[in-house]
């Protein structure tokens, strides 16, 4: 009897575990948080230059009352062109920054539509493919999410 229980136990130990049991969600979550910090810094810099470009457009014709000091730094076509080039360079760097989630990958696809970015389309696609592969390999839940059911409208 004891030998039979031991053989059943050993057989159960040798059976492979289901994939969901092998996912370390705490580790994957920590890895995504590390990526989130780098992504947040790149995003912050890109947004700052985007705001500066928008301000430069507002200052195109004349200074805004109370903001004359900014007009000196942002006014003029050459200064605006430099801001736009720097924003595109920073956007390219953000695209090459590892994405922490699917929302960041979606942003990369949208940002890649700018045809004047200083990186090639192949580099962008390679970065997005690497992000998608990494995100698929590092899930934060053990079970895949179920697709949402679409509600039927009563017309």
Image (tube, rainbow, N blue to C red):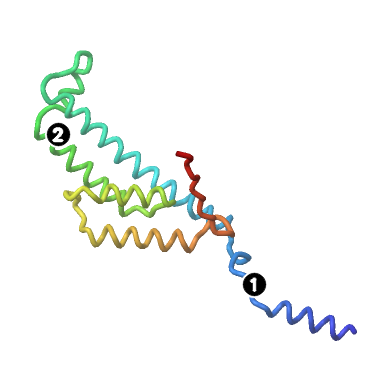
Crowding around mark 1 (Cα neighbors within 10 Å: few <14, some 14 to 19, many 20+) is: few
* Residue at the extreme front: 155
Up-down relation of residue 61 to residue 112 (above or below): above
**Left or right of 21: which side holds 114?**
left
**Which labelled disc corresponds to residue 80?**
2
Q: Residue at x 38, y 54 (%)?
A: 98
Q: Residue at x 13, y 38 (%)?
A: 81
Secondary structure category for the residue under label 1: loop
Crowding around mark 2 (Cα neighbors within 10 Å: few <14, some 14 to 19, many 20+) is: many
* Residue at the extreme top: 65
Residue 59 at what x, y percent from top left? 16, 24
**Which labelled disc corresponds to residue 17?**
1
Asked which quadrant contains residue 63, the reply is top left
Determine contact: label 1, label 2, CB under 8 Å. Answer: no
Residue 52 at what x, y percent from top left? 23, 32
Query: Which quadrant holds the C terminus?
Result: top left
Asked which quadrant contains residue 122, the reply is bottom left
**Left or right of 137: which side holds 121?**
left
**Which labelled disc corresponds to residue 104?**
none
The tag earlier along the polypeptide, 1 or 2, is 1
Q: Residue at x 43, y 46 (%)?
A: 37
Secondary structure category for the residue under label 2: helix
Mark 1 → mark 2, Cα distance in angstroms: 59 Å
**Residue closest to the eye, 141 or 36:** 141
Q: Residue at x 44, y 51 (%)?
A: 101
Query: Which quadrant holds the N terminus?
Result: bottom right
- The residue mark sitting in front, 1 or 2, is 1
Residue 107 at what x, y percent from top left? 34, 47
Residue 46 at what x, y percent from top left? 29, 41
**Residue closest to the eye, 140 or 30:** 140
């Amino acid at each position: 009897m004891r030998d039979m229980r031991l053989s059943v136990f050993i057989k159960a130990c040798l059976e492979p575990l289901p994939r969901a049991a092998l996912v370390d969600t705490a580790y994957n979550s920590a890895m995504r948080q590390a990526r989130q910090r780098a992504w947040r810094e790149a995003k912050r810099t890109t947004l700052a230059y985007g705001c500066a470009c928008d301000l430069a457009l507002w200052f195109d014709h004349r200074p805004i009352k109370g903001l004359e000091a900014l007009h000196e730094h942002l006014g003029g076509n050459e200064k605006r062109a430099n801001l736009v080039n720097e924003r595109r360079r920073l956007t390219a760097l953000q695209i090459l920054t590892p994405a922490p989630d699917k929302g960041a990958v979606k942003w990369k696809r949208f940002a890649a539509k700018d045809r004047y970015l200083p990186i090639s389309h192949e580099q962008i696609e390679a970065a997005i493919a690497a992000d998608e592969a990494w995100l698929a390999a590092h899930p934060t839940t053990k079970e895949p999410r179920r697709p949402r059911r679409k509600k039927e409208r009563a017309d």
